[in-house]
Amino acid sequence: MQFCLEANVQPMLSKLAAMGLLLKSQCSCRISTTVMLHKKMKFSYQQGHAWITAVRKHQRRADNPWVPREMPDRVAIAAATRGGPSGSRAFSEARPELVVPDLTGFQLKPYVDWAAKYGGEPELTAERLFELTYAKSAGVDS
């Protein structure tokens, strides 16, 4: 009995062959793992993940521009590029030290809401803008 293998029949025939119900000699062509048009499947080889973590770090920085960049705490050794001992060494002096002042008894609060209105100047209108820029040179009294 001869079988013609198509892409949707191959999984079923391979299961039958695995169970012993179908012999390989019964198939007219061998069971293939290629796609329908018998082109080679393209495999994505595993690459290092350092580039994708760098991309994600830049995306997080773009999403939150107010968050400062982290300070480096490791320094690459120049001998590693010339074929010497490879790697990087950590220095305790390179780790950032955050200095937070003591604000007890201070009248102003350390946080100002971004939507807070600046109450020192009146609203900027067309007349006010004219007075600020051209009124003195034109000799117009307001």
Image (cartoon, grey):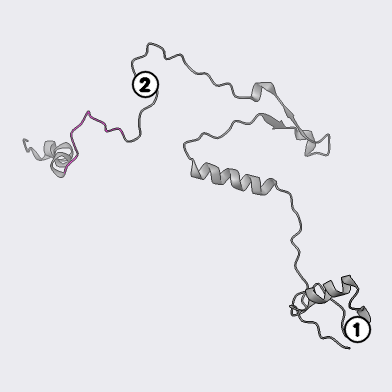
Q: Could you classify mark 2 by the number of other residues whose Cα lies within 10 Å: few (under 14), some (14-19), or many (20 or more)?
A: few
Viewer-closest of 19 and 87:
19
In the image, residue 41 sits, relative to residue 76, either above or below, namely below
Read off the residue under disc 1: 26
Q: Position of residue 83 (x, y in %)?
A: 83, 39
Most extreme residue toward the bottom is: 1
Give the image quarter of residue 31.
bottom right
Count of numbered badges drawn on the protein: 2
Residue of label 2: 109
Which disc, if any, is residue 13?
Answer: none
In the current view of this chain or complex, which residue is farthest to the top? Answer: 105
Residue interval drawn in magenta = 116-125
Residue 80, image quadrant: top right
Question: Which SS type dominates the magenta stretch?
Answer: loop
- Of pointers 1 and 2, the one earlier in the residue sequence: 1
User: Identity of the amino acid at label 2?
Assistant: Lys
Distance Cα–Cα, label 1 vs label 2? 85 Å
